[in-house]
Amino acid sequence: MVGMVMEPIPLTPVAPPPADGPTAGAASAPAPRPVWQRLLPEGVERRPPWLTVRAPVGEGVDRVAALMRQQSLATVCEEARCPNQGECWNAGTATFMILGDVCTRACAFCAVKSGRRGGDVDEDEPRRVAEVVARMRLRHAVVTSVDRDDLPDGGASIFAATIRQIRRLAPGTTVEVLTPDFQGDLGAVGVVMAERPEIFNHNMETVARLYRRVRPRSVYERSLAVLRAAKRMNPGSRTKSGLMVGLGEDAGEVQGLLRDLRAHDVEVVTIGQYLRPSLKHHPLIRFWHPDEFAALKAYGQGLGFLHVESGPLVRSSYHAADQAVAAAR
Ligand code: SF4
């Protein structure tokens, strides 16, 4: 994705102002909801228990953070404020975010910084990513990027170089790339697929109806075409996509998206709950219940996906190594 995202939100409600304060007894409007509560759906006062996560602390978190800092690398775990950072990093996994930490698009759901880029590329970044992959002894490396619409190939050559460097420095590691749509440039997709990643991932993010609001500079059909083209270019790679719920879609629309993915030869899908990063981002319309995620999983399995990862805290790269194993069967 390039990332589903959130800001830390207190899990307990902020106390109301004291009753004996200066306005006590005055006929005044009710106090506005605190910001963290306004990030929740209308009328909802706190996150449901199934979205409770541990803070990102611990030895594993410190170790991964130090490695990334040493090598001047970014992770989508941090940049997108992923709720699973504590779990993943303490388990020794992380998702690399290449091509810098500023994205040339500004999707309404995403916490990654956005702005203009001037064609800058760090040609040594692929080697440093591979070094960290080797040092972390990852069995499965996930590499994503910001959108780089300022580059002629959208950053495809740097994805390709990163795969080559991982093959060189960590030959036993499988590679998953989670790419932008390269503005539909299938030549750029071909540059990536020539390196035969084990998994090619491109996230649809949301249903067709919401694209104009949620991904205004992306095109639903174009993203589907990229996925199908990738599979045709290298049938040995597994294709994968991810989506969020909670943006205002209904179950029928999500089922329609899953059918579209299967019709475009996508083999693995991830489905997770959208969490609103800030008041500037798209409103969170509702929390989907774990039973609804289970129903979507069953629906996807019925369509013939090799693997469906569906749950409130699921993100593209959540348990990605296990997904890769499941999809390889
Ligand atoms: S789910 Fe992915 S992005 Fe989130 S912390 Fe884990 S590896 Fe990072």
Image: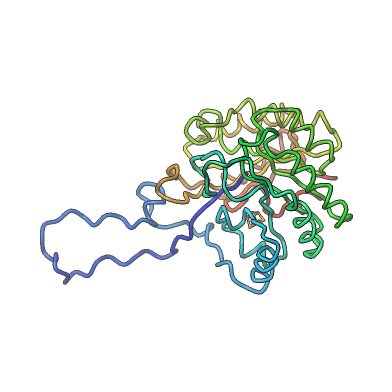
Quarter of the image where one finds residue 154: top right
49 lies left or right of 162 = left
Q: Nearer the viewer, residue 12 or 116?
A: 116
The figure's colour scheme reads rainbow
Residue 59 shows in the view? yes
Residue at image location 10% in from the left, 61% down from the top: 26
- Looking at the image, the residue that sits furthest to the bottom is 59
Quarter of the image where one finds residue 139: bottom right
Instruction: Name the quarter where the C terminus is drawn.
Output: top right
168 lies left or right of 59 = right
Residue 115 position in % (x across, y down): 52, 43
Q: Is residue 101 above or below residue 211?
A: below
Instruction: Name the quarter where the N terminus is drawn.
Output: top right
Residue 209 position in % (x across, y down): 51, 28
Q: Nearer the viewer, residue 32 or 77?
A: 77
Residue 269 position in % (x across, y down): 69, 41
Residue 42 position in % (x across, y down): 36, 46
Q: Nearer the viewer, residue 301 or 127?
A: 127
Residue at image location 64% in from the left, 39% down from the top: 203
Residue at image location 35% in from the left, 49% down from the top: 43
Point out the quarter of the image occupied by ligand 1.
bottom right
Count the marks: 0
Q: Is residue 49 above or below residue 230?
A: below
Q: Is residue 203 above or below residue 319?
A: above
Quarter of the image where one finds residue 194: top right
Q: Is residue 216 above or below residue 310?
A: above
58 lies left or right of 162 = left
Residue at image location 89% in from the left, 54% down from the top: 171
Residue 296 shows in the view? no
